[in-house]
Structure formats: C-alpha cells, structure tokens
Image: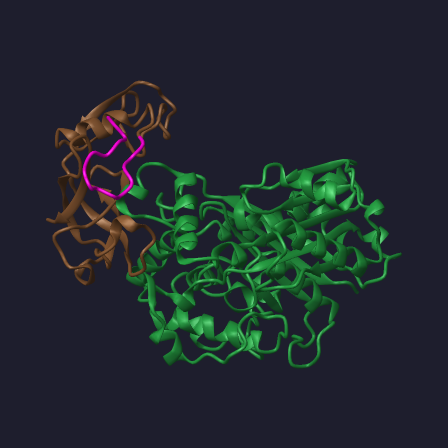
C-alpha cells in the first residue's frame, strides 16, 4: 500500500536556489542578507518578484512578523505567507508548506528562505557574546534551566551525545570523523568559512566548550542567508534551470521534550524519515548523497542511524569508516555543512542538495551520478524535525 | 518567593509559574515534591495544570524519595554567565527520579570527571538565598 501523500511525489519541484554572501559579512543585517539570497534565487530561476505569490521565511526571533518585513522589502504581496517557528526544521517545513499551499490553490510560485546575521551580532565583544547566549536561554524558560547554569544549544545536544556514548560506546574520535569529513568537503567550496585542513589531533586538541563537545563539534556563527523557489513540475518545464523534483517529505516533532522517553538518542528524524521515504517510494539504500542538519557533530551521528543508513548504535563505526567523505557510501554535507561552510539553519543544505542534483559542480565537488539526495532539518528546542527527499529530473 | 537577591548571589534565580510554585515552596522546606495525578496515579514533571498521561486536572503534590540516577550530564568548560565565574568546570545533569519523572539539576559533592550516566544519586538542598533553595543531587 502506498503512502497517502505518494500522490504528490514528483509533482512539485525546486526551480531556483540562491545564497547571500556567506560567513563574515559586516554592514548587512539579516534582512539585507535574505533579500540578497531571494534575489539570487529568483535570478537563478529566471523569475521576477512579481511572479511570486507565496512567501515562507524565517530570520532572527527578535524581528516580529519577519515575513511581512521581507515581503515589504522585496515588493511581494502573497496569497500565502508566514514566518515559521520550528528553528532549524523550519526551512524544509517551508518547502512542505509551499507544496501544500500550491496544492490547495493558495499560491503557485513560493519563495522559501532564511537569513541571519549571527557572526556580526556576536563579534562586537565578549560581553555581547555572553549576553546573546544568556538572553536566548531566558527566552526559553525562566526555571528548570538557567538557575542550574544551563545555557545555549550546545548543552542540550551534549546531553544526547553523552547518553549515546554511554549506551553504545560512541567515542569523541567518532564525532571527530564527522567534523573532519565536512572540513574536507569545505576545502572544495570557495564560499566556505573554514579554509584550512583539519586533523584528528586538531579536533582533539580544540578547547572544550560543553563536554563532551569541544569547539570543533559546534557549528559556525555566520552571517548567511539562502532561498529556494517551489512550483509545480509542470510549470518548471518553462523555466531556466533543470528542475529538482520533490520526491518525498516528512516531519515529526517530539514535543514531549528532549528529556522524555529516548528522544535524545532516537530523534524525530526516525518517523520524519519514514514518512519521507514512504512518499518517495524509496529507502535509505537508494539515497546517493545527504545534507544532514549539523548544528553539532552528534546530531549527524544519531540522524544517520535514525534515517536507517546504519543500525541504531552503529553510527560511530559508520562515520569512522569514511562513509561521509567523497567516494564514501554516503557523501554528506558536500558544501562543508554548518560545521565548516556557514550556519543558516539548514537552508544552505537545501541549496546544496539542489545544486548537486542539477550537476552544476566540477569534479572536485560533484557527487558523481547523484540522482537522489536526502536533506534534513532539526531544531526548535531540539525536538522538531523535517526531511526532504530530492531527485534529479529525468 | 522574591525574585530579588539581597546577597551577592549572581546566578539567575527561578521564576516560578503558577503551576510550579508549590515545587519551589517545598524545596524551601527541604522537601522534594512533584505532582501525582489524582486519576491515573502517575507522577509528572515539569509542573503542569493537567496530567500529560490522562489530562486529568486533579492532582496532589507528593513528596518523593529523592533517590534517582543521572540520566545524562554535561560539563561546562566555557563561561556563559558571570554567576559561574571561578566555578568552571561545572556539571548540569538530567536526573531520573525513582518515581519516574526526569528533572534538570546538577550533581554536587563529586568531581565533574567522576560523574557517570546511570550513577545513583540522592537529593540535597542548597539554600542559595534567603528565599530560594535549589534541589541538587549527590552520589547516593
């Protein structure tokens, strides 16, 4: 029996993708960066702002009704528009909402994007950095956290890493293999923030942040934005680019919390992935490359397991085998990811998946013959998840 | 409970919600209390108006054993808040109580590098200000 949403398989496509300048981009706000990314995505697709009638975006949480500000700046009135609030799961969620909105007749061409100016915000002074971390935690909760010294996203994910190490014997060297693999990919990406090769000795010698995470387990602070454009596969035929088909998607939200049940070692990627595979009519063995949400190294390791690329508990040996690198079983985060390219809450990973399937890269970066790519999004307060299975158009 | 600090205590203090106030008042009296559902009998944490298992409103604040285990923990090596200046490294832990609920706290009375997952612990009470007591956990 096929999945109820299998009827939508291959009927929608991503027809354009763009990014802003990435990394350290002083003098531009999050809004300025997302304008840049949206303009580049429209140009990539050969579309104008007047062709867009859906706008689904996200930016820093302190900008109220972000989508309204972005629409004003881009000169877009939209049949369907909102700001998404699932953290790093939001960007794939926007693509999913775009398909649903088009299917329901509320829009026909939907622009999905994300922008932030985190590097600029956190590099004015050390005091500003600390204020930033503290303020974020206080926005989440005023008890059962800050009074015990719990601040920042690193610690939440580090609880999962610690428990995984305890249950399955996972090691810091195995987390390190993830950081090394993505750095290797980043060296082929001229836009990546991190430009130097990384060794296991470098990884292990980096200062500890929130143990078991050291500095190189943590994603980058970046000024960065990205955007993609979703429309029907039929409409895509008339556009400039080879479309990338939306074969499957899924979401899952472990709203009972990261501390509940076994959520920190069996994440929402599991059910989210099952839904996406069922819609696409394929399984993990059919995926040629992946862009996995890498806020912290551990999240890649558990998602590799949760998505069925290996058994639960076998993620450590899997990543240590070289599977994520060029020529490996599952080339992953081929742009360098959020650990080594730039952190834009997952939107850059959708862009990278699209470009791999368009086959735009030279031999150093292109995954040879890639026809399918799995992209993941993870966030909110560690419990929201989203999955895209993309395919090259025939 | 006052949220003002009259001492030199620089760490954030809990901001109780209407639902969690009895937890903090009990802690002030050095008792660890959580809600027990009046219908299905299960314990719950964090505090809430309804039972997450059966949605019943009726409940009783019930003293628990204070015994549990470290479900997971992290060790801060970087200063995120001036209140912990000079206390790096420090541990933040998820404690699973014998009665089932998990709560966020810290492990005290042991070096950070000797804390382990599944390590048995028992509650201890730290009167951090005149008005506020934090339940913490020590090796059992």
Q: Write down the colour of chain A.
A: green
Image coloring type: by chain
Q: Is residue A178 magenta?
A: no
Q: Write down the colour of chain B.
A: brown
**Percent from the top left, x then y, of residue B81?**
32, 50
Question: Nearest the camera: B80 or A206?
Answer: B80
- Does A54 sit above or below residue B62? below
Q: Is residue B3 magenta?
A: yes
Residue furthest to the top: B58
**Residue A65: quadrant of the picture:** top right
| In this picture, residue B123 sits left or right of residue A150 | left
What secondary structure prevails in the magenta region? loop
- Does A328 sit above or below residue B33? below
**Percent from the top left, x then y, of residue A116?**
58, 53
**Residue A326: quadrant of the picture:** bottom right
Question: Nearest the camera: B124 or B96?
Answer: B124
Please give the range of residues in magenta.
B1-15
**Percent from the top left, x then y, of residue A219?**
48, 62
- Does A20 sit above or below residue A1? below
Q: How many discs mark residues in the rendered view? A: 0
Q: Does any portion of residue A314 appear in the rendered image?
A: no
- Residue lying at 37% horizontally and 26% vertically, measured from the top left: B54
- Residue lying at 39% horizontally and 66% vertically, measured from the top left: A215
Q: Does any portion of residue A57 appear in the rendered image?
A: yes
Question: Nearest the camera: B103 or B40?
Answer: B103
**Residue A57: quadrant of the picture:** top right
**Percent from the top left, x then y, of residue A107?**
78, 39
- Does A101 sit above or below residue A341? above
| In this picture, residue A183 sits left or right of residue A229 | left
**Image quadrant occupied by the N terminus of chain B:** top left
- Residue lying at 34% horizontally and 75% vertically, measured from the top left: A205
């Amino acid at each position: 029996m096929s999945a109820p949403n299998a009827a939508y398989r291959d009927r929608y496509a991503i027809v354009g993708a763009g990014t802003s300048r990435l990394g350290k981009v002083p003098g531009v706000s999050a809004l300025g960066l997302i304008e840049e990314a949206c303009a580049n995505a429209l140009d990539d697709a050969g579309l104008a702002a007047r062709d867009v009638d859906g706008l689904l975006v996200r930016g820093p949480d302190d900008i109220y009704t972000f989508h309204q500000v972005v629409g004003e700046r881009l000169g877009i009135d939209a049949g369907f528009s909102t700001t998404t609030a699932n953290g790093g799961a939001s960007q794939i969620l926007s693509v999913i909402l775009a398909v649903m909105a088009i299917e329901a007749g509320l829009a026909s061409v939907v622009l999905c994007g994300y922008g932030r100016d985190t590097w600029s915000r956190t590099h004015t002074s050390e005091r500003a950095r600390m204020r930033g971390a503290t303020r974020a935690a206080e926005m989440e909760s005023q008890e059962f956290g800050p009074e015990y010294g719990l601040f920042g996203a690193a610690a939440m994910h580090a609880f999962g890493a610690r428990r995984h190490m305890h249950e399955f014997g996972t090691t810091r060297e195995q987390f390190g293999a993830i950081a090394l693999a993505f750095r290797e990919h980043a060296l082929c990406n001229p836009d990546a923030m991190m430009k130097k090769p990384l060794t296991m000795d470098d990884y292990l010698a980096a200062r500890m942040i929130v143990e078991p995470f050291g500095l190189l387990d943590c994603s980058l602070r970046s000024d960065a934005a990205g955007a993609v454009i979703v429309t029907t596969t039929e409409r895509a035929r008339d556009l400039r680019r080879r479309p990338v088909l939306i074969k499957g998607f899924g979401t899952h939200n472990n709203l009972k919390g990261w501390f509940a049940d076994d959520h920190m070692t069996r994440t929402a990627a599991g059910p989210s992935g099952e839904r996406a595979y069922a819609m696409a009519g394929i399984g993990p063995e059919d995926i040629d490359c992946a862009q996995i949400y890498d806020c912290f190294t551990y999240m890649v390791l558990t998602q590799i397991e949760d998505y069925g690329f290996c058994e639960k508990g076998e993620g450590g040996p899997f990543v240590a085998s070289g599977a994520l690198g060029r020529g490996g079983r599952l080339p992953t985060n081929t742009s360098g990811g959020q650990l080594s390219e730039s952190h834009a809450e997952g939107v850059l990973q959708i862009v990278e998946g699209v470009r791999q399937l368009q086959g735009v890269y030279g031999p150093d970066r292109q995954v040879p013959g890639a026809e399918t790519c799995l992209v993941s999004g993870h966030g909110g307060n560690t419990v929201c998840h989203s999955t895209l299975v993309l395919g090259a158009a025939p | 409970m006052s949220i003002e600090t009259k001492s030199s205590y620089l760490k954030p203090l809990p901001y109780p919600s209407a639902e969690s106030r009895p937890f903090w008042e009990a802690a002030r009296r050095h008792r660890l209390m959580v809600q027990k559902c009046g219908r299905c009998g299960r314990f719950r944490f964090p505090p809430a108006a309804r039972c997450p298992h059966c949605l019943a409103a009726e409940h009783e604040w019930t003293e628990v054993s204070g015994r549990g285990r470290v479900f997971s923990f992290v060790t801060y090596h970087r200063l995120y808040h001036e209140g912990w200046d000079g206390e790096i490294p420090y541990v933040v832990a998820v404690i699973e109580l014998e009665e089932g609920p998990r709560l966020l706290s810290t492990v005290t009375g042991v070096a950070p590098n000797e804390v382990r997952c599944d390590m048995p612990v028992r509650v201890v009470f730290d009167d951090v200000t005149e008005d506020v007591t934090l339940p913490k956990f020590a090796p059992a």
